[in-house]
Image (cartoon, rainbow, N blue to C red):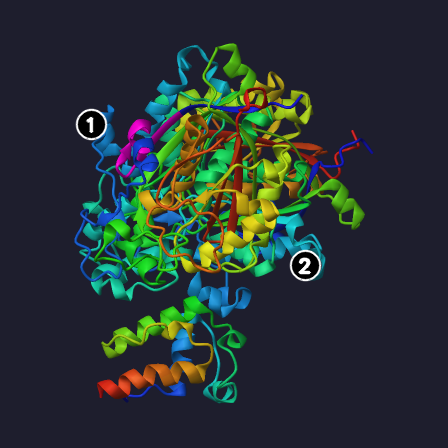
Amino acid sequence: MSGHPRRAAITGIGVVAPNGTSTDTFWKSTKEGISVLDRITREGCGHLPLRVAGEVRDFDPPALVEERYLVQTDRFTHFAMAAADQALEDAGLGRSDTDAAPFAVGVVTAAGSGGGEFGQRELQQLWDKGSRFVGPYQSIAWFYAASTGQISIRRGFKGPCGVVAADEAGGLDAVAHAARAVRRGTDVLVAGATEAPLAPYSMVCQLGYEELSTVDDPGRAYRPFTAAACGFVPAEGGAMLVVESEAAARDRDAAVRATVAGHAATFTGASRWEESRQGLAQAVLGALAEADCAPEDIDVVFADALGTPEADRAEALAIVDALGAHGRRVPVTAPKTGTGRSYAAAPVLDVAAAVLALEHGLIPPTPNVFDACHDLDLVTSRARAAELRTALVLSRGLMGSNSALVLRRGAGDAS
Amino acid sequence: MTRRVAVTGLGVVAPQGIGVPAFWDLLSHGRTATRGITFFDPAGLRSQIAAECDFDPAAHGLDPEQIARCDRYIQFALAAGEEAVRDSGLDLAVENPWRVAVSLGTAVGGTTRLEHDYVLVSERGKRWDVDHRQADPHLHRAFSPSTLASTVAERFEARGPVQTVSTGCTSGLDAVGYAFHTIEEGRADICITGASDSPISPITMACFDAIKATSPNNDDPAHASRPFDADRNGFVMGEGGAVLVLEELEHARARGARVYCEIGGYATYGNAYHMTGLTSAGLEMARAIEDALDQARLDRTAIDYVNAHGSGTLQNDRHETAAVKRALGEHAYDTPMSSIKSMVGHSLGAIGAIELVACALSLTHQVVPPTANYETPDPECDLDYVPRIARERKLNSVLSVGSGFGGFQSAVVLNLPREETR
Amino acid sequence: MSDRITVEELTELMKKSAGVTVSPEELRQGYDTGFDAFGIDSLALLGIVGELENRYGTPMPVDAEKSKTPQQFLELVNSVLLTEA
């Protein structure tokens, strides 16, 4: 054992994603490269010029969340509660474990858009009927902090609670924030992000993103790194993780699935994709330095894969800029092409997929992408078996953030 | 070696306190900026009062394109950011941009713009299947609050970690707390931090109406915000923004910068109790205070002033009084504690940063701002709330606390550098 | 619609406004036990009061949302509705 008593470990994973509402189903779909992108079916969205998305259809809120939360909270919080429950169960942390030391457990989420569907309903009440028809839960359901607050209250967690209301890259920042809270002395953080941006008004808001794909064919709408790249497809859902001090996990004989070894974040301006090349490379170098990891030690890269030619080129170059010649050889994958990008939650799903890939020695493929036009070893068509010890997860946000996270398999000591 | 974090620049947009001099003049004279709402017709609302900013973005150097593109809360942050960076004397052109971070808080972000456009696309709430053709081309910038930190980072060409923090009403304290950690942990040398909110809109007023959190003192707006007073009956909505330039202390000293104070410590905990309710014991806020003091390596008796959350709701005032007594012990009775929300209202996520600017100015001027409108003591709130009149006092270390929906309880300790204590 | 709020109507409101399912029978049995035992907090009562005010077009008594028990709540709101009638 090396002397890292406060190293941050991932001991639990919970997933509510378009391609699976449990970690098992998510991994099965991810490794098989199944694309679930489809026409949007949510009520009131059919007429909008955004036709394809990753919807979470296999989610039964009443079965997973108490009735009062269904009334009091938005869909993004339903996802977060269900994913947090799964992650805690996976980590073997029950109420009896956490009630004993409530200040030792905190919650941190990233949130890109808050409770948009709930908010639209209350706006409708206000403007159609009058201010007296706005209910008491608008004040706690719509705002970006709703999921962190509700998870903390529902599970009795009194540790540090935070919310990075961020770009896509904020999902990685939330995981890193949790790892730093562990280093500062908190034993356990429930960390991650979930999003529910597929309500009519939320979708109208997204139409201004110039990187959004408006292609109607689900098989062709989101194909990063190809000559046919035409933007990204939005999605809902997300993942929550249990990030725990390695020592605390060891004390209770919990399995360390991976360690959060390094992270760094940079900023290069909204939609300035060409400049994101340098920003992303800097983030990777920072994360490698924190992880004390050589570029050649990276065994797989989970790419951001925004899906516009300029952004894809910048990312492909950034990988080589940061990893050198190894950047052309290292397997790169983007399983999110099968589910869409659930904004701040997308990179958290990638972290979940990366941990599962490390555990299974299997790199999941990039659905719908067959003909990559960049100098990368992109894993397409089917999963690839490989000895995996270290994974690099990349994310960029539409508002200009770049973030990189290094994960090591298991306790990370064997090298 | 521990990296210490200095405050080297301040900027503020507060109601009747736009710019640091005007803001300090308001606070040090105990004037109130609360009035009847003028931004829209508040008829039908229970609470029809607010502390509004008479803010002219063009006068703060924003060009027409920026004004069209940026929501009001982002305009506040740009204006406060300009003032703070100028005040710091930093020449960002010669700093390493990868070592400059941004951490800004907001509770409700672009809600005001979101509501404005919602009305257009929904035909005033008639349609669920809204008509996108009526939407403003900049609407997507209101969708996610990350636009706040992003826009300010673009303005100052920061390339380090950039994040928006949104923990409801503790967003301002937490954003500065995250900034403090960012520099302390060595991830940046400079951080442009603070918070901003512009929540005076029908939906936000209506949602607080629905839970009777805001004051219905519509007949006497100037005296409506009455924290700790026995006759208080809710908070008065506010708006504004504040920016602090944080800098690694040696970096600041190397360039001969003016150091207002240091960030000594920051902590936050959840009360795991209720989304809007507070316990009477104040255990979690007390713990945040104790943690922040530990980080600052200060004994509780070192605290010379407490800048209270002091929203003016019954449960807050009692919760907070209990928490401060729990954390500071008998010393709480000897420590002045005031709420500037009595003067500038409660600007949700922004107020924590505005209060930290007030704290830095208190340390500079060695003056404690008062709690305006405080007249009738509440027997359950028995501390020294600095009624109505600012007070000169020797100040070395001050504490600012905040509490917010979702159960967030945060505390920040600011202190003069030890080698400069008075 | 009757001009008195019944236990049945209160249970319907508890479900609609707060997502709490209680049968009228259960509510009658717990008529004088606290709302908190049913999972009804101050926000839930504010929602119920708001719904009643909109339904009956009349303000409910100040502090109705602070009622501790269903009995107390129904007596309070019905006192207003009976006066109105």
Q: Which residue is mark 1?
A: B58
**Residue depicted at 55% across the width and 36% down the height:** A380
Q: Is residue A338 above or below residue A373?
A: below
The reply, left or right, for residue A96 in relation to residue B117 is right
Label of residue B325 in the image: none
Q: Badge 1: few (under 14), some or many (20 or more) residues near its Cα, within 10 Å?
A: few
Q: CA distance from mark 1 to mark 2?
A: 54 Å
The reply, left or right, for residue B43 in relation to residue A233 is left
**Residue depicted at 25% across the width and 79% down the height:** C56
Q: Position of residue B413 (x, y in %)?
A: 54, 35
Q: Nearer the viewer, residue A50 or B225?
A: B225
* Quarter placement of the C terminus of chain A: top right
* Quarter placement of the N terminus of chain A: top right
The reply, left or right, for residue A132 in relation to residue A8 is left
Asked which secondary structure carries label 2, the reply is helix
Q: Position of residue C2 (x, y in %)?
A: 28, 89
**Residue depicted at 31% across the width and 88% down the height:** C4
Q: Over which residues does the magenta segment extend?
A: B10-23
Q: Amino acid at mark 1?
A: Ala
Q: Are circles 1 and 2 on residues that touch, CB within 8 Å?
A: no
Chain at tag 1:
B
